[in-house]
Image (tube, grey):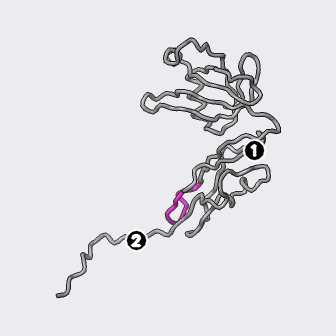
């Protein structure tokens, strides 16, 4: 889902009433707008958006016949009510960097030969719209025990078009040796008196 339809929101209508009517309040903001746009999208579209995209994903929004190229900056979800509360979108401009985050997805976790520890789940970065990263996948197949991968080791983050907002030496994941734990069947050592 790379495209959604939104309508301008009547700010006189209370947010609770809007949600009961099957809509999610959203805001679209950016440097090229004189003021932020209060918009609404259907709850079903918001659920599909949450299912297929994430914070940091690019999405085109059509509002009043105009298509806005945006980045999902924030998606507030109420897990108790099982509903999306609010979504914030930032308008992107060609030639102008935007701050975002890229989710790190580890593939073939079951093939890791030791204990896998993922330390970094997301990598904050800045880039022009066409270079923003949404998700970066790292394949664990063939990674031996003792493997340590840092942000700077991942090829996507080595691009001159990406400005990392985290230390490139930050550890993304490591694979440690499996440690056998004594289950206590041998009992405590006997005291010598």
Q: Residue at x 76, y 24 (%)?
A: 67
**Nearer mark to the viewer, of 1 and 2:** 1
Relative placement, left or right, of 140 versus 126 is left
Q: For mark 2, does the 10 Å Cα neighbourhood hold few (<14), some (14 to 19), or many (20 or more) residues?
A: few
Q: Residue at x 65, y 47 (%)?
A: 124
Query: Residue 85 appears at what percent x and percent y?
Result: 52, 27
| Disc 2 element | loop
Magenta span includes 38: no
Using the image, tell me which numbered label, if any, was put on residue 34: none
The N terminus: image quadrant? top right
Label 1 belongs to which residue? 127
Which residue is nearer to you in this view: 166 or 119?
Answer: 166
Which residue is nearer to you in this view: 74 or 184?
Answer: 74
Query: Residue 130 appears at what percent x and percent y?
Result: 78, 41
Q: Residue at x 66, y 30 (%)?
A: 89
Q: Hey, which residue is sitting farthest front in the picture?
A: 34
Q: State the image quarter where residue 95 is shown.
A: top right
Label 2 belongs to which residue? 180
Residues shaded magenta = 107-118
Q: Residue at x 26, y 73 (%)?
A: 185
The C terminus: image quadrant? bottom left
Query: Residue 181 appears at what percent x and percent y?
Result: 37, 70
Query: Residue 177 appears at what percent x and percent y?
Result: 50, 70
Q: For mark 1, does the 10 Å Cα neighbourhood hold few (<14), some (14 to 19), or many (20 or more) residues?
A: some
Above or below, comparing residue 142 to residue 93 in the picture: below
Relative placement, left or right, of 149 versus 183 is right
Magenta span includes 116: yes
| Disc 1 element | strand
N-term mark: 1 or 2 = 1
Above or below, comparing residue 17 to residue 154 in the picture: above
């Amino acid at each position: 889902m790379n495209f959604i339809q939104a309508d301008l929101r009547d700010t006189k209508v209370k947010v609770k009433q809007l949600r009961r009517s099957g809509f999610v309040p959203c805001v679209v903001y950016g440097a090229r707008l004189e003021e932020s746009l209060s918009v609404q999208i259907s709850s079903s579209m918001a659920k599909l958006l949450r299912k297929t995209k994430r914070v940091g994903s690019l999405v085109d929004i059509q509002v009043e016949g105009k298509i806005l190229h945006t980045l999902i900056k924030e998606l507030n979800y109420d897990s108790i009510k099982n509903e999306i509360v609010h979504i914030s979108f930032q308008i992107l401009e060609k030639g102008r960097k935007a701050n975002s985050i890229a989710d790190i997805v580890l593939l073939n976790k079951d093939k890791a030969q030791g204990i896998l520890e993922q330390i970094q789940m997301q990598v904050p970065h800045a880039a022009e719209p066409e270079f923003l990263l949404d998700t970066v996948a790292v394949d664990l197949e063939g990674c031996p025990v003792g493997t340590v991968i840092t942000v700077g080791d991942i090829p996507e983050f080595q691009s001159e078009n990406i400005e990392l907002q985290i230390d490139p030496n930050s550890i993304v994941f490591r694979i440690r040796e499996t440690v056998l734990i004594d289950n206590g069947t041998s009992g405590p050592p006997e005291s010598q008196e």
